[in-house]
């Protein structure tokens, strides 16, 4: 991808500073005519010490960044913006309107977590005579970040800087998610660079299908996600059907169903699927609870952004009694802790959806502590579970689980549903990239994927005729050449 003889630093370029051969900390820099544009500014998740170091130290001076273009609100794409501002960034942050609304809720929640985390470590340090630690960022940093946002609707070109124009198209991944097209002007011929962001799947509930980012101009360079570049998901159409049998089984034995789910996206998808199953008369209506203050806030954001919904969601809204896709008669949203605790004593059958998605923190851990040893209960796993998490221990059905330091025998039924994924799989990614012209495409960089996943996609794309495909390491720079 690098052009020979043009390494004078003035050549337009992309440098990959995060989500390079891994799936978190999305952060890429585009340089063009002295302007520096940051694509995404995500939190890096990993071991505590390494994560702290990576997130608090940028490999560039934040005050030199001209503007940020944000693909979507997931915290591994947006979550380090307040640190950028804390360290001197004063430019604008461009996102879609729904991403801006989600960031308002999620960055505040993230600051709360950073503050609690710092308190916890400081307490431990005190016992060892070590100095206190400061949070990565605070509520004040979030308050300083939010006014920098500019909301730009899909399919509407806008100026990021003097020489760079951009456009968002729906990536169909979460509410407000976007693929980005950048046009670098002022060279002899403009250079068209596209960034997929995280790509969704055709047919996902609530959201419209991903819109191809290359329809307006022939794309010269592509930055493409590869999270599941080597994996096949069960079809989206099976989402609702997969819920049916286990749901009925747990209801028959009067068990409670605990579903750990991330607050953004998965929780709303589940509510939507249950709503539709009830509407279609396929399941009986039992009490259901969404027990997470963040999920409640995020669901409110969903309601305020119907411009992102697909046709089926509009039909469900029209068919439902109170015109709400995310509400039905026996569904309750819980904010306060007392109501959450009452669920511990409640007799089944009922459903409780709670965060966090990998069962590492949040109210779901309390629900699991009260459910895992009850043979009538069911734990439904609907999301990716990383190694060493409580969620993973449930997936592999460890006979004894440690929850809050106490041993619990696993007697509840654990059901793992694999059709719930908001990321395109191997086939869907290849089908998306197939739409670009191999003749026009001068280089593809695969990001946001572990190397084993990215390599499978790399091979597939080469066999489709794309000659220059690479998997950049962190810090790698690629020069962009005009025609
Ligand atoms: Zn995402």
Image: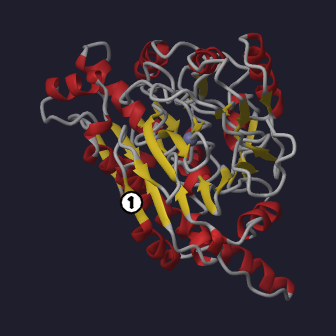
Q: Is 323 on the left or on the right of 147, as rendered?
A: left
Q: How many marks?
A: 1
List x then y, in percent, for residue 167. 44, 42
Can residue 242 be seen in the rendering of this structure?
Answer: no
List x then y, in percent, for residue 396. 74, 28
To which quarter of the image does residue 404 belong? Answer: bottom right
To which quarter of the image does residue 388 belong? Answer: top right
Residue at (57%, 41%) from the top-left corner?
Answer: 190
SS category of the residue bearing label 1: strand
- Decide: few, some or many residues near mark 1? Use Cα within 10 Å; few <14, some 14-19, many ≥20: some
Q: Is 123 on the left or on the right of 113, as rendered?
A: right
Residue 293 vs 419, above or below: the answer is: below
Residue at (54%, 69%) from the top-left corner?
Answer: 111
Residue furthest out toward the left: 321
Q: Is 199 on the left or on the right of 30, as rendered?
A: left
Which residue corresponds to mark 1? 150
Q: Nearer the viewer, residue 256 or 236?
A: 236
Q: Nearer the viewer, residue 264 or 431?
A: 431
Q: Nearer the viewer, residue 193 or 236?
A: 193
Can residue 98 be seen in the rendering of this structure?
Answer: yes
Residue 48 vs 154, above or below: the answer is: below
Q: Quadrant of ligand 1?
A: top right
List x then y, in percent, for residue 179. 51, 37
List x then y, in percent, for residue 479. 76, 45
């Amino acid at each position: 991808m690098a052009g020979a003889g043009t390494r004078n630093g003035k050549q337009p370029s992309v440098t990959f500073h995060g989500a390079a051969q891994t799936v978190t900390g999305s952060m890429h820099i585009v340089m063009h005519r002295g302007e520096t544009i940051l694509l995404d500014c995500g939190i890096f998740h990993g071991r505590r010490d390494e994560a702290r170091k990576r997130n608090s130290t940028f490999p560039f001076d934040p005050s030199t960044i001209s503007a940020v273009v944000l693909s979507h609100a997931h915290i591994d794409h947006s979550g380090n913006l307040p640190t950028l501002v804390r360290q001197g960034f004063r430019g604008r942050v461009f996102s879609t309107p729904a991403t801006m609304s989600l960031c308002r809720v999620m960055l505040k929640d993230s600051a709360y977590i950073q503050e609690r985390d710092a308190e916890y470590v400081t307490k431990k340090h005190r016992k060892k005579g070590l100095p206190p630690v400061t949070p990565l960022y605070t509520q004040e940093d979030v308050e300083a970040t939010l006014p920098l946002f500019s909301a730009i609707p899909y399919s509407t070109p806008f100026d990021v800087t003097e020489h760079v124009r951009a456009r968002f198209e729906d990536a169909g991944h979460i509410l407000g998610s976007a693929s980005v097209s950048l046009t670098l002007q002022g060279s002899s011929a403009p250079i068209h660079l596209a960034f997929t962001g995280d790509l969704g799947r055709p047919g996902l509930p609530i959201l419209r299908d991903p819109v191809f980012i290359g329809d307006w101009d022939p794309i010269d360079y592509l930055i493409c996600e590869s999270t599941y570049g080597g994996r096949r998901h069960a079809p989206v159409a099976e989402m609702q059907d997969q819920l049916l049998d286990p749901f009925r089984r747990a209801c028959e034995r009067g068990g409670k169903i605990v579903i750990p789910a991330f607050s953004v996206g998965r929780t709303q998808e589940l509510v939507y699927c249950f709503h539709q199953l009830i509407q279609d008369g396929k399941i009986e209506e039992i009490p259901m609870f969404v027990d997470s203050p963040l999920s409640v806030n995020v669901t409110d954001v969903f309601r305020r952004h119907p411009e992102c919904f697909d046709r089926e969601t509009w039909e469900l809204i029209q068919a439902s009694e109170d015109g709400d896709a995310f509400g039905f008669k026996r569904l309750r949203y819980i904010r306060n802790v007392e109501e959450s605790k009452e669920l511990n004593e409640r007799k089944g059958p009922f459903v409780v959806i709670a965060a966090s998605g990998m069962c590492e923190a949040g109210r779901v851990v309390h629900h699991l502590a009260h459910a895992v040893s009850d043979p009538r209960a069911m734990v439904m796993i609907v999301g990716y579970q990383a190694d060493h998490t409580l969620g993973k221990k449930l997936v592999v059905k460890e006979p004894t689980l440690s929850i809050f330091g106490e041993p619990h025998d696993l007697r509840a039924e654990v059901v793992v549903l694999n059709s719930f994924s908001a990321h395109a799989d191997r086939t869907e990614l290849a089908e998306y990239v197939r739409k670009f012209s191999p003749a026009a495409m001068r280089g593809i960089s695969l990001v946001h994927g572990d190397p084993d996943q990215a390599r499978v996609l790399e091979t597939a794309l080469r066999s489709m005729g794309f000659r220059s495909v690479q998997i950049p390491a962190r810090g790698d720079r690629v020069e962009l050449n005009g025609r």
